[in-house]
Amino acid sequence: MEGVIRITRIRVHYHLKIPAGTRDRAQRALDTHQAKCPAAMSVKGTIEIETSAEIEEI
Protein backbone atom coordinates (compact mmCIF):
# COMPACT_ATOMS: atom_id res chain seq x y z
CA MET A 1 0.00 0.00 0.00
CA GLU A 2 2.14 2.77 -1.34
CA GLY A 3 1.71 6.23 0.17
CA VAL A 4 -0.07 4.99 3.31
CA ILE A 5 1.30 6.23 6.62
CA ARG A 6 1.72 3.37 9.10
CA ILE A 7 2.09 3.58 12.87
CA THR A 8 5.04 1.40 13.85
CA ARG A 9 5.85 2.68 17.33
CA ILE A 10 4.05 4.37 20.21
CA ARG A 11 6.01 6.03 22.99
CA VAL A 12 4.28 6.58 26.33
CA HIS A 13 5.92 8.64 29.08
CA TYR A 14 4.25 8.89 32.47
CA HIS A 15 4.74 11.66 35.03
CA LEU A 16 3.57 10.01 38.25
CA LYS A 17 3.14 11.57 41.67
CA ILE A 18 2.66 8.77 44.16
CA PRO A 19 2.37 8.55 47.94
CA ALA A 20 5.67 8.10 49.76
CA GLY A 21 6.57 4.47 50.26
CA THR A 22 4.65 3.14 47.25
CA ARG A 23 7.40 3.26 44.60
CA ASP A 24 7.73 -0.55 44.45
CA ARG A 25 4.00 -0.97 43.81
CA ALA A 26 4.00 1.75 41.15
CA GLN A 27 7.00 0.22 39.40
CA ARG A 28 5.37 -3.25 39.39
CA ALA A 29 2.24 -1.74 37.83
CA LEU A 30 4.33 -0.05 35.12
CA ASP A 31 6.28 -3.25 34.46
CA THR A 32 3.16 -5.37 33.95
CA HIS A 33 0.51 -3.01 32.56
CA GLN A 34 1.12 -3.76 28.86
CA ALA A 35 0.35 -7.44 29.35
CA LYS A 36 -3.01 -6.53 30.92
CA CYS A 37 -3.96 -3.66 28.59
CA PRO A 38 -6.51 -4.63 25.92
CA ALA A 39 -5.32 -1.87 23.58
CA ALA A 40 -1.67 -2.94 23.86
CA MET A 41 -2.60 -6.58 23.37
CA SER A 42 -4.62 -5.77 20.23
CA VAL A 43 -1.57 -4.25 18.49
CA LYS A 44 1.04 -6.64 19.88
CA GLY A 45 3.40 -7.79 17.15
CA THR A 46 2.47 -4.97 14.77
CA ILE A 47 3.15 -1.79 16.75
CA GLU A 48 6.05 -1.44 19.18
CA ILE A 49 5.07 0.22 22.48
CA GLU A 50 7.78 1.93 24.53
CA THR A 51 7.02 3.11 28.05
CA SER A 52 9.02 5.22 30.45
CA ALA A 53 8.18 7.08 33.62
CA GLU A 54 9.23 9.81 35.98
CA ILE A 55 8.11 8.86 39.45
CA GLU A 56 7.91 11.42 42.24
CA GLU A 57 7.00 10.37 45.76
CA ILE A 58 5.00 13.05 47.61
Image (cartoon, rainbow, N blue to C red):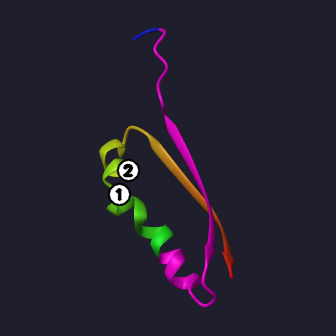
Q: Residue at x 52, y 42 (%)?
A: 10
Query: Which quadrant of the view contains residue 15?
Result: bottom right
Residue 9 magenta-highlighted: yes
Q: Position of residue 58 (x, y in %)?
A: 68, 82
| Disc 1 crowd, CA 10 A, few/some/many (<14, 14-19, 20+) | few
- Please give the label number shown on residue 37: 1
Front-most of residues 32 and 25? 25
Q: Which mark is residue 40?
A: 2
Q: Amino acid at mark 1?
A: Cys
Amino acid identity at mark 2: Ala
Q: Residues within 10 Å of mark 2 (few under 14, many from 20)?
A: some
**Is label 1 in a helix, a strand or a loop?**
loop
Q: In this rendering, would 6 be left or right of 51?
A: left
Q: Residue at x 35, y 57 (%)?
A: 37
Q: Position of residue 13 (x, y in %)?
A: 61, 55
Residue at x 55%, y 56% (from the top left corner):
51
Report the front residue among 21 and 46. 21
> How many dots with numbers?
2
Instruction: Give the alpha-carbon distance from disc 2 to disc 1, as whole Å.
Output: 5 Å
Taking the magenta stretch, the answer to whether it contains residue 45 is: no
Rendered location of residue 6, percent (x, y): 47, 25
Tell whether label 1 touches label 2 (CB within 8 Å): yes
Magenta residues (range):
3-28
- Where 52 falls versus 11 (above or below)? below
Left or right of 45, for residue 55: right
Residue 31, image x and y in percent?
A: 48, 69
Of 26 and 5, nearer the camera is 26
* Picture quarter with the N terminus: top left
